Amino acid sequence: MGIPESDTLMTHSQEIIDLYSRHVIGNYTRYPVCLVRGEGSYVWDAEGNRYLDFFPGWGCGLLGHCPPQVVEAVREQVGTLIHVPNTWYTEPQGRLAEALAQRTGWGGQCFFCNSGTEANEAVIKMARLWGGPERYKIITMYNSFHGRTMGALSATGQPKYHQGVEPMLAGFVHVPFGDLDAVARHIDSETAAIMLEPIQGEGGINLPPAGYLEGLRQLADKHRLMLIFDEVQTGMGRTGHWYAHQDWAIVPDAVTLAKALAGGVACGGLIARPEFAAKLRPGTHAATFGGNPLACAAALATIETIEQQGLLERARQLEQQFRQRFEAMRARSPLIKEIRIKGVMIGVELTTDGAPVVASCLEKKLLVNCTHGTVLRLLPSLLLSDAELNEGCDIIEEALTR
Ligand SMILES: Cc1ncc(COP(=O)(O)O)c(C=O)c1O
């Protein structure tokens, strides 16, 4: 049996769900909805229902669904050159590296791959190559999330994700996020690097305490360690800066990116200061699809859109608007314990299980996420309109009242 022609494609969610149950490995918990189309802040299912998406693409949809400039750039690139290996030079990769490095404020050189976990694998290898055989340990944080491949998973400080696939890679030391003394206590002669998300995402949208990131920079300088920021979730303007760490005016040694980097097209990246970047010499690391012209064209269009439409500023406006809405809700609802927001990275800690709230929002055609059981997590688009923001917040408020 071949692939059906487009006019005979199945159009009911249940038929697709049945196909999945027969042929797709069941490693994800999925909602019983088959999405077929997206535009801006909305997606549509196979039955034609429209959903307002406050969690587009699990953080990849920073410009919403099918952002026009990205669509155009991909259309143009796909008919020109889709993929060539990294044995050749291509203009989009060179231009993207330049654009990313220029926006750090501290320069840097780039390596490209296809996902966040791969970007973190690359930086883990870079840290070990830089540290040499004697210094291979990396200090990372509890409640962190760095990805699902074995290196990034070992870096992830959440034992629940390690269960059943141990032993983890040696050399990762986990300490509580926000505790500078704990980091200092665990540095020894074998330590090569400190690696963390400047704002923890999957761990519950946890903001760093005052002075913490600056303190880590000082510790790294004092002990000659590499300071690595995983900006896979925080990067590309989500927090109102190109890179979240720019809010604290610190210079890291390397930053990893993915998710929003290419407007929803798979693309991962690593930017490192030259001293560290030089350690990835030919033969040390590679990714066949990494930095392909299609992904790089999409990423360049993403950067252009953010710049041309003033979306870093918009992130700060949306932060204020969401804050006002959630503060007002908190005044009315005992279910809201704490609100943690930076740009369009929003965590609302509830005093109760978040799953029924997510289910109730879905019923009202609003897509939101819950992490760590009780934290409602929103990663909306920078192109969200005021009206859409209010529409979604009204639904959340109704769900909390229920
Ligand atoms: C901070 C952070 N790092 C790494 C990853 C892994 O990215 P990917 O799923 O693209 O491998 C994620 C994914 O949620 C993340 O939030």
Image (cartoon, helix red, strand yellow):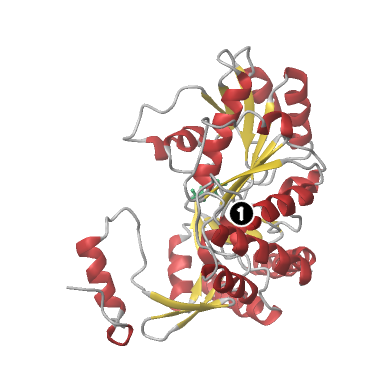
Residue 23 in the image, given as x and y percentages of width and height = 22, 61
Q: Nearer the viewer, residue 262 or 150?
A: 262
Residue 43 position in % (x across, y down): 49, 77
Q: Give the amino acid type for the residue marked by disc 1 in the picture.
A: Thr
Residue 351, quarter of the rendered image: bottom right
Left or right: 245 as drawn, with respect to 162: right
Say if 29 sits above or below 120 in the image: below
Res. 394 visible in picture: yes
Residue that label 1 marks: 90
Tag 1: Cα neighbours inside 10 Å, few (<14), some, or many (≥20)? some
Outermost residue to the left: 1
Position of 393 relative to 239 (above/below): below
Viewer-side residue, 274 vs 83: 83
Taking the spot 41% from the left edge, 28% from the top edge, the residue there is: 168
Give the image location of residue 204, x and y in percent: 57, 49
For the question of whether residue 179 can be seen, the reply is no
- In the rendered image of this protein, does residue 202 appear above or below residue 159? below
Judged from the image, the secondary structure of the residue bearing numbered disc 1 is: loop
Numbered-mark total: 1
Q: Position of residue 198 (x, y in %)?
A: 67, 43
For the N terminus, the image quarter is bottom left
Residue located 46% across and 32% down the image: 154
Q: Residue at x 68, y 28 (%)?
A: 226
Quadrant location of residue 166?
top left
Please, is residue 196 above or below residue 184 in the view?
Answer: below
Confirm or reject: label 1 Cβ below 8 Å from ligand 1.
no
Q: Residue at x 55, y 37 (%)?
A: 122
